[in-house]
Amino acid sequence: MIQRIQSVFLLLLALAMLATAALPLWTKTDPLTNGSLTLTAFNLYRGPSAAAGEVVASAWPIGALAITAAATALYAIFQYRRRSVQLLVCSLNLLLVVATLGAAFLYSSRADAMLNVKMEGHYLAGFYLPTLALVLNLLASRYIRQDERLVRSMDRLR
């Protein structure tokens, strides 16, 4: 199970999505008033930092999608005996990760309009981790397909 490379990729994918849920995704600061907006996976905060700021809006769909994608990746790891189901779960996970990335972009673009400053906001590490998760998901799917081909070729030899 864990000795297979696709299990390692799926575990890293789950960790990346959990980190997405934990890390800030986007921030924008007004240099004149020192006001700032910080987007996390669950809320949009206004204030000097996410810990000390007030909640302006809820962004729970980002966090829900990220945690669901992480749970789906962990479920896929334990489907190692049924590779066709594992491939199907990876395909579902691909959609969840893309939806997480889309929701993060949507909420950050809406938050960008809330602070009327000509400067652009900055995407943080939490925003880029779903992109890493996409690559890891594609690699896991590739190696699962490769395993399936190997098992089928061994069945032909019998």
Image: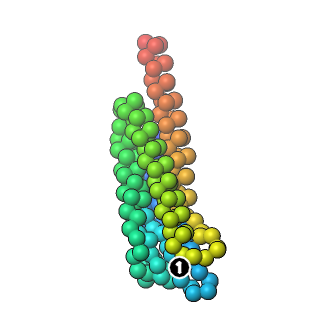
Task: Pick the quarter of the image with the C terminus.
Answer: top left
Q: Is residue 119 left or right of residue 51?
A: right
Q: Which residue: 41% across, 80% down?
A: 54
Sort mark 1 into few (<14), some (14-19) or many (20+) by Cα contacts within 10 Å.
some
- Compare residues 85 and 37 and report the one nearer the observer: 37
Q: Is residue 158 left or right of residue 35?
A: left
- Compare residues 111 and 93 and report the one nearer the observer: 111
Tag 1: amino acid: Ser
- Compare residues 93 and 103 and report the one nearer the observer: 103
> Horizontal and vertical percent for residue 78?
35, 41
Q: Which residue: 41% across, 75% down?
A: 56
Residue 149 shows in this picture: yes
Pointer 1 residue: 36
> Horizontal and vertical percent for residue 144?
47, 34
Callout 1: SS: strand
Q: Which residue: 52% across, 47% down?
A: 134
Residue 16 shows in this picture: no
- Compare residues 140 and 43 and report the one nearer the observer: 43
**30 relative to 141, above or below:** below
Q: Which residue: 47% across, 43% down?
A: 94
